[in-house]
Image (spheres, rainbow, N blue to C red):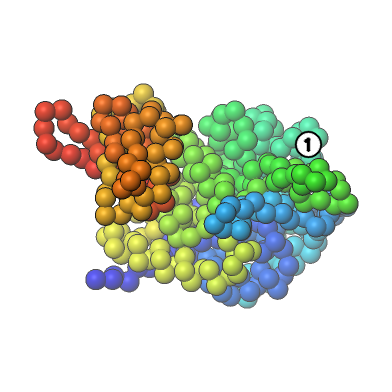
Amino acid sequence: MYKKIDLSMEFLGIRLENPFILSAAPPTDEFDIAYNGLKAGWGGIILKTTSVEGNSVPLKYPMMSSFGSMSRKVIGLGNIDLISGYQIDEIEKRVKTLKEVFPEKMIGASIMGTKKEDWQTLVWRLKKAGVDLIECSFSCPQGSMGEEAGRMLAQSIEATEKVARWVKEAAEDIPVLIKITPQVTDIVEVAKAVKRGGADGITASNTIPSLLGIDINTFEPYPSLFGKGAYSGLSGPAIKPITLRTIAEIAKNVDITISGNGGAFNWRDAVEFMAVGASNVQFCTLPMHYGFRTIEDLKRGFAHYLSDMGFNSPLDIVGKALPNIKSQDELPSPKTLAELVEEKCVGCGLCYSACFDGGHMAIDWDSEKRVPHFDEEKCVGCAMCMQICPVDAIKMKEKIEGSNSVYYFVEKR
Ligand SMILES: Cc1cc2nc3c(=O)[nH]c(=O)nc-3n(C[C@H](O)[C@H](O)[C@H](O)COP(=O)(O)O)c2cc1C
């Protein structure tokens, strides 16, 4: 039976009515849009990254392109957006107003600067305006406000620690999140630098630097601005696996609060982000694509999941999957085999060609009956056939020598 679950939780000392936050991006850039997001029921927002007056950002349009697949038009969004065109004089007014209208919501703001004075001025002014949390963008893929032009700040361990310390020194009791990039050699070292710098948490992570595509007739990159293009930041479902790994690596190695961000598109993704160590989840591409009402699906699905699983609060699932994430050499090594679920097979033959050209030639094809036969001697149990079967007609099993007992692995993911 469904037990009503209270989705409210504490995050760095701030009460959130639910763990779903609008990240620093277009849905939090215009005042009216941010207002509508909070009204729709999101737990909090982080206003799009701002800067000190005079640090103008040259925005270029069109700034969006998409990465698709055959079955879904958009599985990733690419943007060449930069930080907000609104600077701190405007953002401090918005923080004040939003806090007055929505006192129970988390109003965060994202900042980016160059000099110590800029970072600290941004913090002092936001603090005075009543902000609940400050997020620092150390990872804008298009930005050049880092230590070196064109390099993201979070790609330097020294700069990460130094700037985190400047910000926290000014923020004092206001929680500070550092938004990092997975585009580094060792994410754990970056997370340790954030902690040494005294910041309260990490947003893991941001868009991923990418090149969305090339028009093969004109050789123009996407998005094309009169024939020329720049590298984009990739967001949305396409980057979820990278984000999951980033969160898990940090959570396993550094004792620091994590806000998960990058590729979450539904409540299941949110559960996964939290299961690998995030305390809440930020969203951008989902509301940009399908609107703010998606919060209703997130809240409902998440609450039902917690109830079905016997949990009482969102925080009960944080880190639940971490003990199961091992290094390759720590994994068990059973003898696995593929097995056909005959009643599901539609005779397409995809498993046969995948195994013949990309596996171990362990499938014989009965062309008359159009069914595959698995050769248990040749099958190494790689699971490629299970991954490509369009109707889930292949399962992987563990066969224990000299016994009839069979263990079926979790089905295709
Ligand atoms: C058009 C666009 C503009 C963005 N601008 C910012 C920004 O100003 N500051 C920032 O920290 N992140 C910015 N982001 C990144 C998002 O906040 C978020 O980290 C990223 O999109 C990954 O989350 P998602 O997969 O849920 O979209 C932007 C993303 C998009 C798509």
Does the beta carbon of the residue at mark 1 sit less than 8 Å from ligand 1? no
Against 353, residue 269 (above or below) is below
Please state if 10 lies on the left or on the right of 141 as rendered. Answer: left
On the image, the x and y values in percent for residue 392 come to 35, 51
Residue located beneath label 1 in the image: 150
Q: Front-most of 324 and 135?
A: 324
Please state if 385 lies on the left or on the right of 310 as rendered. Answer: right
Which quadrant does the N terminus fall into? Answer: bottom left
On the image, the x and y values in percent for residue 216 come to 76, 44
> Does residue 249 appear in this view?
yes
| Callout 1 crowding tier (Cα within 10 Å): few <14, some 14–19, many ≥20 | few
SS assignment at label 1:
loop
On the image, the x and y values in percent for residue 322 come to 38, 40
Amino acid, disc 1: Gly
On the image, the x and y values in percent for residue 321 come to 36, 44
Residue drawn at (40%, 44%), measured in percent from left and top?
349
Q: Front-most of 359 and 201?
A: 359
Which quadrant of the view contains residue 312?
A: bottom left
> Does residue 392 appear in this view?
no
Residue drawn at (33%, 46%), measured in percent from left and top?
368
- Residue farthest to the front? 368
Please state if 219 lies on the left or on the right of 388 as rendered. Answer: right
Against 380, residue 24 (above or below) is below
Residue drawn at (38%, 29%), measured in percent from left and top?
361
Against 294, residue 66 (above or below) is above
- Residue farthest to the left? 403
Q: Front-most of 295 and 174?
A: 295
